[in-house]
């Protein structure tokens, strides 16, 4: 496990170099500043360049950037808002955690039972219809699904019902902070992020359950006259859930990767929306910080998946 942790740190180190280099290639903030404000003097440009360390070699800029993050947790200053990147990012964490957590819970609560029941009723009408819809779910891109949901449930349904059942943007209506209002804003982004994951959990759980149902020890349990409910829930389900638990941990990182799309479509004020907005505006320090945070999340949840897999399956050992 120590070796995996060290490997994760190496991955993050390489990711930090790649992020810093790629974001730097996208343009010079001073050039954009000059284009947006032609009256700015060369002296002011030189002063700003020195303030943000842009007059130093790229390697030195990277070393200062990564040193401040590792030693002080400081992601630097925003080029556009002239304030600490930390002050910009911290208020955006809770909306993203709320959105991703809700999407993960909804996906697991629907996808896993659906896959279990499909496996038990293998080749039935329910299984065939469910298989069709899971493949449809796999085929729908996040951005397309989000726009369709906005149009159908946010616009047409509101016209038909005479009131807004689902909100199509933001996290709260102006002047309201109630739970109902929050759920109305949360529903469509959660559905957008959940559909593919429901299909994923369903197919994966169905496959794992079928492997267990065909095993010898379950045939023995049936031959001994155990009730079907006891065979499925007590003997089969426990082993069939082992690989799904691992997939749950891995999918947290996957859902986080879909957050920029869903948050941008629905103007959800989270980290994903901030990432797209900072790239669009050329606020490179904010973009670097968010890309590095997403990289840390991917590595962290992969490591958690390894730990969980070793905990739930005694056959797996990293010693």
Image: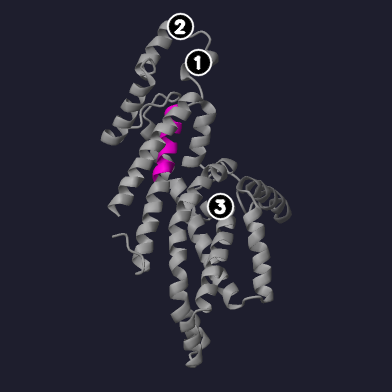
Circle 3 SS class: helix
Please tell me the numbered disc located at residue 31.
1
Magenta stretch containing residue 289, yes or no? yes
Give the quadrant of the N terminus.
bottom left
Residue at which label 3 appears: 193
Residue extending farthest to the bottom is 225
As measured in the structure, the alpha-carbon distance from the residue carrying label 2 to the one carrying label 3 is: 47 Å
Give the vertical position of 12 relative to 79 (above or below): below
Residue 203 in view, yes or no = yes
Whether pointer 2 and pointer 3 mark residues with C-beta atoms closer than 8 Å, the reply is no
Q: Residue at x 49, y 36 (%)?
A: 275
- In the image, residue 263 lies at what x, y percent? 54, 43
As measured in the structure, the alpha-carbon distance from the residue carrying label 1 to the one carrying label 3 is: 37 Å
**Which one is closest to the eye, mark 2 or mark 3?**
3
Q: Mark 3 packing: few (<14 Cα in 10 Å), some, or many (20+)?
A: many
Whether pointer 2 and pointer 1 mark residues with C-beta atoms closer than 8 Å, the reply is no
Tell me the magenta residue range.
Answer: 284-296
Query: 140 or 41: nearer the eye?
Result: 140
- In the image, residue 48 lies at what x, y percent? 39, 15
Query: 31 or 218: nearer the eye?
Result: 218
Residue at which label 2 appears: 41
């Amino acid at each position: 496990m120590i070796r995996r942790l060290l490997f994760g740190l190496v991955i993050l180190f390489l990711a930090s170099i790649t992020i810093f280099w790629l974001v730097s290639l996208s343009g010079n903030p001073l050039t954009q500043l000059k284009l947006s404000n032609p009256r700015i003097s060369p002296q002011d440009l030189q002063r700003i360049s020195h303030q943000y360390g842009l007059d130093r070699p790229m390697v030195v800029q990277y070393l200062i950037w990564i040193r401040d993050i590792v030693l002080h947790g400081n992601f630097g200053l925003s080029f556009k808002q002239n304030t600490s990147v930390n002050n910009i990012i911290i208020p955006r964490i809770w909306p993203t955690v709320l959105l991703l957590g809700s999407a993960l819970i909804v996906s697991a609560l629907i996808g896993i039972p659906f896959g279990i029941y499909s496996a038990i009723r293998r080749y039935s009408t329910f299984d065939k219809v469910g298989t069709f819809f899971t493949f449809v779910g796999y085929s729908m891109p996040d951005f397309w699904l989000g726009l369709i949901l906005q149009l159908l449930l946010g616009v047409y349904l509101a016209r038909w019902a005479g009131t807004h059942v689902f909100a199509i943007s933001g996290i709260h209506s102006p002047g309201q902070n109630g739970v109902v209002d929050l759920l109305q804003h949360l529903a469509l982004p959660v559905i957008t992020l959940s559909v593919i994951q429901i299909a994923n959990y369903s197919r994966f759980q169905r496959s794992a359950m079928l492997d267990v149902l065909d095993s010898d020890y379950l045939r023995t349990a049936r031959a001994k006259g155990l009730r079907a409910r006891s065979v499925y829930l007590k003997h089969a389900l426990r082993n069939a859930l082992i690989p799904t638990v691992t997939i749950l941990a891995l999918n947290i990182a996957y859902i986080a990767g879909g957050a920029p799309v869903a948050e941008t479509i629905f103007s959800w004020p989270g980290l994903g929306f901030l990432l797209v907005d900072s790239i669009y505006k050329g606020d490179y320090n904010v973009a670097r910080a968010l890309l590095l945070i997403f990289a840390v999340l991917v590595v962290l949840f992969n490591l958690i998946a390894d730990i969980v897999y070793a905990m739930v399956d005694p056959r797996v050992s990293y010693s």
